Amino acid sequence: MTDVRVRVRPEVDDVALSALHAAGFDETPRLRRWSAQLAAHSLSWLDARDGEALAGFVNLAWDGDRHAFLLDLVVADGYRRRGIGRALVAGAVEQATAAGCTWLHVDFAPHLIPFYRSCALPPTDAGLLRLHR
């Protein structure tokens, strides 16, 4: 993870984060108001920066009590397999622990099982319903 630094609750560039998220999740790019969404609904968020370049991001949402949820974990194509995703998850775990959360939830596709296991997050059974595309 050379020259990449992880920041906790940084100021968010809505345009850059929208582009990173769309590319990482293979979605049609659209501008999202990340700043407002994070401020209203998240316990914390972290980004990874290589100088000024946005290399990764994770959102740590919560229920206001004991349950935290990892959402929107994404690492830019050119930065993958360098430990950035694991560093973002580790930072989110620290933030949830410091807030007194008991549980950290994350949903992921089967091909990501090895990655999340490497982050000490084993797979569990869960239900998931896609409401619209």
Image: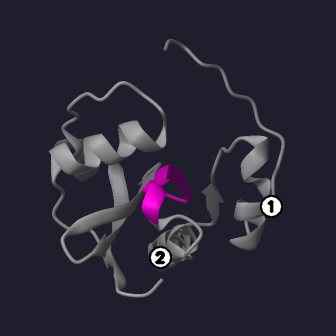
Q: Which residue lies at the image location 24% right of the left edge and 66% below the top edge?
A: 53
User: Which of the two residues, 129 or 2, is positioned nearer the viewer here?
Assistant: 2
Question: What is the residue that sits farthest to the bottom in this orientation?
Answer: 2
Q: Mark 2 — residue? A: 91
Q: Which residues are magenta?
A: 65-78
The 10 Å Cα crowd at callout 2, few under 14, some 14 to 19, many 20 or more, is: many
Q: At numbered mark 2, what does the secondary structure look like: helix, strand or loop?
A: helix
* Residue 82 spot, x, y in % from top left: 55, 75
Residue 39 horizontal side relative to residue 57, left or right? left
Residue 111 horizontal side relative to residue 72, left or right? right
* Residue 27 spot, x, y in % from top left: 42, 28
Q: Which residue lies at the image location 30% right of the left edge and 76% below the top edge?
A: 7
- The kind of residue tagged 2 is Gly
52 is within the stretch colored magenta: no
Q: Which mark is residue 93?
A: none
Question: What is the residue that sits farthest to the front in this orientation?
Answer: 78
Q: Which mark is residue 122?
A: 1
77 is within the stretch colored magenta: yes
**Residue 127 in sight:** yes
- The kind of residue tagged 1 is Pro
Which of the 4 image quadrants contains residue 122? bottom right
Q: Which residue lies at the image location 79% right of the left edge and 61% below the top edge?
A: 114
* Residue 89 spot, x, y in % from top left: 54, 68
Q: At numbered mark 1, what does the secondary structure look like: helix, strand or loop?
A: loop
